[in-house]
Each structure stands twice: as C-alpha cells, then as structure tokens.
Amino acid sequence: MDQSYDHTNEDVEEAWYNRSFGQDYLLVYKHRDMEGAYEEVRAMVGWLSLPQGASVLDLCCGMGRHAMALRDFGYNVTGMDLSKTLLSEAVKHDDGGADNRPVTWVHGDMRNVPLTGPFDAVVNLFTSFGYFDNHDENAQVVDEICRLLQPNGRWIIDFLNPVYVQRNLVPRSVRSEGRTRIEEVRCIEAGYVRKSITLREPGKKERCYEEQVRLYELDDFKRMIADAGLELEAVYGGPDRSGYDRQQSSRMILVGRKLGVRGRSRSSES
C-alpha cells in the first residue's frame, strides 16, 4: 500500500473544524497515545468478527492511532480525514507495522468520501460525528458508511453519551504543555456540547479555537441508521464491552451490519 495520501479537489466551507484540527490540535491532545488506542481496538476487533486481511476504513482517522492499531491486528486499513495536518502526522508515524504494511491514507470529507469501496468494515471512532450544524449533513455521514460497505459489511460508530456528558461536564480547566498554557471552557448550548480552547505562550499571540458536537441520543441514531439501510445489532457503554446505560455510560458505541441498499427516506431536520 502507498503511504502517501490523496487530496480532494473540492473546498469545504469555512467552519470550526477547518481551523481547529491543525498544528495546535497536536499540542492540545498530546495526551492521547497509541497504547490507549490499541486497547480500544482490541475490544472492537471482537465486535467486527472479521478474518485477517479484511478491508477496514477508519472514517475520520485523525492522527491515525486507531487505524494503525487496526492494521496491527491484521486488517488492510484505509484511514481518511479532512485535516492535512493530522494526516501528515499519521504518515510520519506509520512504520508499516510488523508486516511492513502501511495504512493507506486519504484526504477527504466524511460527507462525501472520495472512495468507492466496498469495505468489509467502516469504523467512526472517538466521537468523530455530529460536527455539522445541519442534521442532514450529519445523517449523510451514516449514508456514506452504508455506501462504502459491502453487503453484510460491519460498522462501528463510537460516540459520546449525551446524558453522561451533560451530568459530568467540567465548565473550565487549565493546564500547561511546556511553556503553553491551555484553557478549555465547556458548555451545553442549543443541543450541542461546545468547547472554547485558548492557548497562551510567552512572547506569542494568543490562539483561540472552537469545537462542537451535536448531542445525538440513541433514538436519533436508530432513525439515521434505519434510513441509511443499516442494521443496529448492539450498543455498548465502552470498549470494555459493558452494556449501554443511558444514565451511567461514558460512551455510546453502536455496532451493526449493512442490509440491502435502499433509498434515503428521512425528512429534513435542522
């Protein structure tokens, strides 16, 4: 596989994710390591139930932590992300694994993935969903997962648990990475969890970023999944395979397979 990544020709509109997933993201989320991703993927491999060599797409792969872990479990992996900065970081750290089999890295938008597949599995991990203001754009991501899967192909969407987030939200936190002071302010507003991130470093201009995720409930996902032509088989509360508890689980991990292809029938929401 080629370690280089492709570039889409179409520009997406200016939005928070175009600015936030850049060089400073690597500093703000420096604490997310490969070992943690490897342990999360270890649990997910059992849910996928795929043979060695199966093709897996990591949709919104970021720095590639989960994609490289999936590769190390014996899958042929493609990782796609919108951020060229994060993809460059992924390429830099991809040594090909024990079998010298690099991940295929692709630049693209999850609403209109520049791939045809079909894949044996598509995974969307670590709350890489719900970024868009318009509901239909978020639902389009689920449609894309269906389009990219072969019949009976497996899929995983790993999302936050809205109730848990609302109950356990830390309004403000401050920490340091070297000489950089990182302040994060969080709130629940208009159905979204929103975060403002401010970085201050002596002798440098203050940098500010925004992040947001729409707080989709399990019933919302069930509608999008059914409309797309997917089947939901199980919902877990974490990579430890614990059952999903709406009040207590920190995450909402949905697992299923693709049914027959059918047209989009959802009504428009905003």
Image: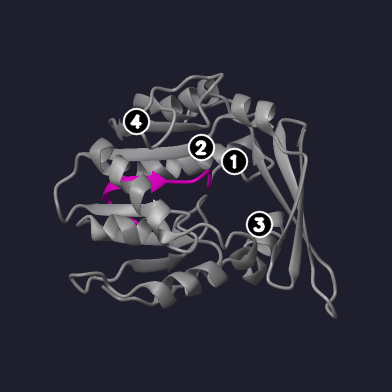
Q: Report if the CB atoms under discs 3 and 1 are less than 8 Å apart.
A: no
Give the spatial CA distance, label 3 vs label 1: 11 Å
Name the residue that disc number 1 marks.
Answer: 130
Q: Quadrant location of the C terminus?
A: top right
**Tag 3: residue type?**
Tyr
Q: Report if the CB atoms under discs 1 and 2 are less than 8 Å apart.
A: yes
Q: Quadrant location of the N terminus?
A: bottom left
**Tag 1: residue type?**
Gly
Residue 23 falls left or right of residue 128: right
- Residue at horizontal 29%, vertical 46%? 42
* Mark linked to residue 241: 4
**Upstream in the sequence, badge 2 or badge 4?**
2
Callout 2 secondary element = strand
The residue segment tinted magenta is: 116-128
Residue 168 seen in render = yes
**Upstream in the sequence, badge 3 or badge 4?**
3
